[in-house]
Image: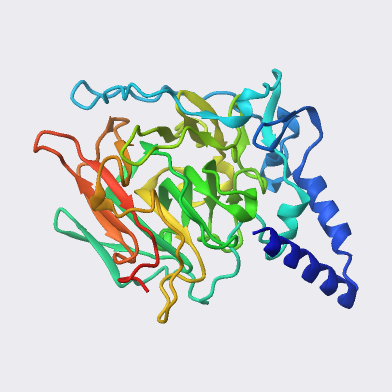
């Protein structure tokens, strides 16, 4: 990976010299835009620098729709309680944490933001696409009118709209007005074959023609953005299937952070162990009916919100919820090998089950009646079932299902 970064740096420098473009100036300008002045900076033991930024000077306010935005410090509603029949049992495992928290804390009135480094910008395909997927390999990045992929809910045929350069395996719920979703996602550090690829375990809420508008959160391994193979907390939004809008975390303006304790992009620990103890993060995303904002929570801590004012179809509700994994690579869904060897989840297939495969448990949706419950109709789906699989498993007829997903990518059946 180090050699690749050196190559990119040299290639970028030579291109700049030949074209007359002031790359250094552009990178400096981008760094100044991304890294806001810090009240305090914390050097984490994993090498990250966390800047404690005045809450009113965070990147969100660079968005045109948020120039005069008043920060909502907390949701105007309480997340609904579960009924006695659906309450989850305590796992008994230690609560997950972020590595930087061992090195300090941010003062009141500030929010922690992971500092973007020069080498991370230089490794990007372009400054424009940093924090977003690169240009799709196909001009038909998302088809908003027709699809060849379907799931069936209660006799209804529901279209699934794949996105170019993404391979997903997930559990999907449709047929309702969704005002929120949550789940406990166990933590792994899957292999990523190339620094321009990434892998996630996450929750999606979707709306719009072809499901092009999404709000997402979970953990991801993304060497290009973070420079390592650690699983890191992320949130993301897009209005057009990742083409020109939205981004990961606070790399572009949009998400409003309110927590001084949690960093988007911060590494999460401890990791699950094969045949050993399983550790998970609890992620929830819920709609505030008063403000129209979508609130993200990590465990018991409210991190912040995706403002309703920057959204279109998602202003009021979602029409689809998905739980599962996503691999981004130019080498997925191709007609000729090789397929990427970037793994999803733990890197093992879903049928390996507990202690081996990646899982999401205690899945919940908030429906139009503001009830928190397990969704009535769900279906498994995998875009490349020989590469990555999905399996909603019930240990006993009376048990609540646990959703398993993942796979190694390239293998003898997925060459």
Camera-nearest residue between 396 and 189: 189
Q: From what the image shows, is residue 319 above or below residue 302? A: below
Q: Residue furthest top?
A: 108
Q: Residue at x 33, y 66 (%)?
A: 384
Q: Nearer the viewer, residue 309 or 45?
A: 45
Q: Visible in this render: residue 4?
A: yes
Task: Determine whether, in the image, residue 292 is placed left or right of residue 321.
Answer: right
Please tell me which residue lies in front, 327 or 136. Answer: 327
Tally of marks: 0
Q: With 399 as the anchor, is 275 left or right in this view?
A: right
Percent across and percent down for residue 242 are: 54, 60
Question: Quarter holding the N terminus?
Answer: bottom right
Figure quadrant of residue 110: top right
Asked if one can make out residue 367 in the rendered structure from this viewpoint, the answer is: no
Which residue ends up furthest to the bottom in the rendered image? Answer: 336
> Which residue is nearer to you in this view: 370 or 50?
50
Q: Residue at x 52, y 32 (%)?
A: 291
Q: What colour scheme does the image use?
A: rainbow
Rendered location of residue 120, percent (x, y): 71, 53
Q: Is residue 400 left or right of residue 267?
A: left
The image shows residue 80 at horizontal and vertical percentages of 34, 24
Q: Looking at the image, is 300 positioned above or below residue 13? A: above
Residue at the spot 46% in from the left edge and 67% down from the top edge: 340
Q: Image quarter for residue 410?
A: bottom left
Report the quarter where the C terminus lies. bottom left
In the rendered image, residue 239, in percent from the top left (x then y), is placed at 53, 56
At x 22%, y 47%, the residue is 392
């Amino acid at each position: 990976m180090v050699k690749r970064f050196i190559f990119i740096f040299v290639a970028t420098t030579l291109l700049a010299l030949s074209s007359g473009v002031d790359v250094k100036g552009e990178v400096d300008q981008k760094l100044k835009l991304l890294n806001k002045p810090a009240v305090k900076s914390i050097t984490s033991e994993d090498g990250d620098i966390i800047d404690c930024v005045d809450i009113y000077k965070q990147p969100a306010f660079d968005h045109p729709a948020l120039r005069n935005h008043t920060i909502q410090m907390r949701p105007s509603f309480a997340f609904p309680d579960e009924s006695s029949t659906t309450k989850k049992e305590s796992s008994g495992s230690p609560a997950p944490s972020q590595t930087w928290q061992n090195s300090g804390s941010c003062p009141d009135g500030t929010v922690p933001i992971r500092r973007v480094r020069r080498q991370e910008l230089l490794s990007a395909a372009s400054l424009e696409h940093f924090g977003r997927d690169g240009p799709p390999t196909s001009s038909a990045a998302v088809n908003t009118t027709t699809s060849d992929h379907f799931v069936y809910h209660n006799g209804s045929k529901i279209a699934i709209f794949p996105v170019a350069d993404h391979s997903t395996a997930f559990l999907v719920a449709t047929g309702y007005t969704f005002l929120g979703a949550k789940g406990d996602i166990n933590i792994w550090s899957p292999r990523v074959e190339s620094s321009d690829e990434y892998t996630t375990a996450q929750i999606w809420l979707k709306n719009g023609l072809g499901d092009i508008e999404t709000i997402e959160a979970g953990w991801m391994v993304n060497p290009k953005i973070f420079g390592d193979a650690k699983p890191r907390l992320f949130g993301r939004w897009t209005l057009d299937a990742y083409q020109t809008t939205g981004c990961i975390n606070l790399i572009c303006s949009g998400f409003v952070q309110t927590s001084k304790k949690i960093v988007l992009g911060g590494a999460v620990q401890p990791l699950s162990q094969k045949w050993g103890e399983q550790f998970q993060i609890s992620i929830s995303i819920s709609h505030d009916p008063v403000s129209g904002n979508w609130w993200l929570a990590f465990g018991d801590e409210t991190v912040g919100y995706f403002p309703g004012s920057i959204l279109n179809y998602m202003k009021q509700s979602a029409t689809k919820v998905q739980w599962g994994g996503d691999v981004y690579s130019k080498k997925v869904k191709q007609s000729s090998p090789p397929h990427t060897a970037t793994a999803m989840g733990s890197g093992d297939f879903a049928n390996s089950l507990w202690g081996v495969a990646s899982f999401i448990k205690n899945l919940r949706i908030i429906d139009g009646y503001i009830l928190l419950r397990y969704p009535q109709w769900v279906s498994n789906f995998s875009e490349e079932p020989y590469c990555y699989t999905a399996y909603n498993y019930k240990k006993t007829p009376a048990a609540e299902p646990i959703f398993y997903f993942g796979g190694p990518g390239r293998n003898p059946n997925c060459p």
